[in-house]
Amino acid sequence: MLNICAVASHGTIVQAAEALFITPQTISGQLRELESQVGSELFRKEGRRLVLTETGRLVFSYADEMFRLGIELQDMLSGRTQGTAITLKVGVAMVVPKLLAYRVLEPVLQMQDPVKLICHEALLVDLLADLSVHKLDMVLADSPINPTLNIRAYNHALGESGITFFAAPDDARRLRSEFPVSLHGQNILMPSSGSSLRRNLEIWFQRQQIEPMVVAEFEDRALIKTFGERGTGVFTSPTAVEQDVIDKYRVEVAGRSDEITESFFVISPERHIKHPAINTITQTAKNDLFKSCCW
């Protein structure tokens, strides 16, 4: 049953085999056996991809639910009968600021029942692939899952935050008096091209008729802050973690904008969250970290 879930999520037997660490021949043989038992084909070809037939979708829905319930049962038995910590496997999208990820996940370490937190950082598309085959319990992302993806997962909005512009202390004090006009021609550190924040920043600069000097761009948001701390240029971070940035990187606020926002989501296999740790994460984020936001 796990094989049909993997093939449905990845679209090819080869990619499914790589994700499951088995040979394509093994998956092909097991799928043929399952189709023989069901009495109908489970996949059809569309170009180079395999897509579920109507029967395949029915089998997939039951298989996915069986695995989800099995994992929940395993976690509950591990936590209750053996007295060990419940494991929460989290994928963090690379574009999510590290300080914000910590603030979102930190409440699970304060829960009355012990939780063992396992974090994995990667591109969102790779994390969603792992989520689809139950290698992860949830994904923390800055965008909802694309509805065109053939993955059974659900978006849970945590909140949104405006943007704060930071700089080394001397630069920040100079820029504050005439912000945002003072950003014109100013050295700035930007997130990588193609990210939602990069697009929103560029639109905002155009609207304000500001042309900053982009001296570097980064995929790693923590690396941006390290460069900014050294006075290389202005950088941004969600206002929700403004004080955390000031304390950690010894920078000051150059200005703020509520016209540019970043949204954050938990993506999980559950439509209605039952996992106690994920429920703690979502409720604490909505009530505390993003308490001024409306959804």
Image (cartoon, helix red, strand yellow):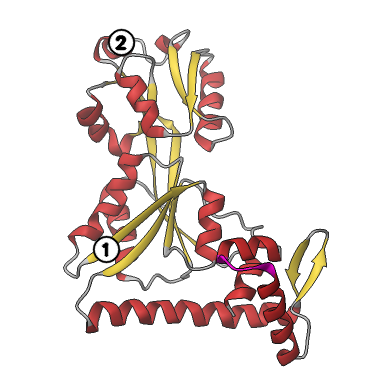
Measured as percent of width and height from the top left, residue 215 is found at: 48, 15
Q: Amino acid at mark 2?
A: Asp
Secondary structure beneath label 1? strand
Secondary structure beneath label 2? helix
Measured as percent of width and height from the top left, residue 286 is found at: 32, 54
Q: What numbered label is drawn on residue 171?
A: 2
Measured as percent of width and height from the top left, residue 103 is found at: 27, 47
Q: Which residues are magenta?
A: 20-24
Q: CA distance from mark 2 to mark 1?
A: 42 Å
Q: Is residue 175 left or right of residue 41?
A: left
Do we see residue 197 in this rendering? yes
Q: Nearer the viewer, residue 251 or 75?
A: 75
Q: Nearer the viewer, residue 133 or 205?
A: 133
Q: Nearer the viewer, residue 204 or 81?
A: 81
Query: What residue did someone put label 1 on?
Result: 116
Label 2 vs label 1, nearer the camera: 1
- Which of the 4 quarters of the picture holds residue 228? top left
Question: Is residue 288 shown above or below 182?
Answer: below
Q: Is residue 77 left or right of residue 8?
A: left
The mark that comes first in sequence, 2 or 1, is: 1
The answer to whether marks 2 and 1 mark residues whose Cβ atoms lie closer than 8 Å is no
Q: Residue at x 63, y 65 (%)?
A: 17
- Which of the 4 quarters of the picture holds residue 5? bottom right
From the image, give the main secondary structure of the stretch colored magenta: loop
Crowding around mark 2 (Cα neighbors within 10 Å: few <14, some 14 to 19, many 20+) is some
Q: What numbered label is drawn on residue 256?
A: none
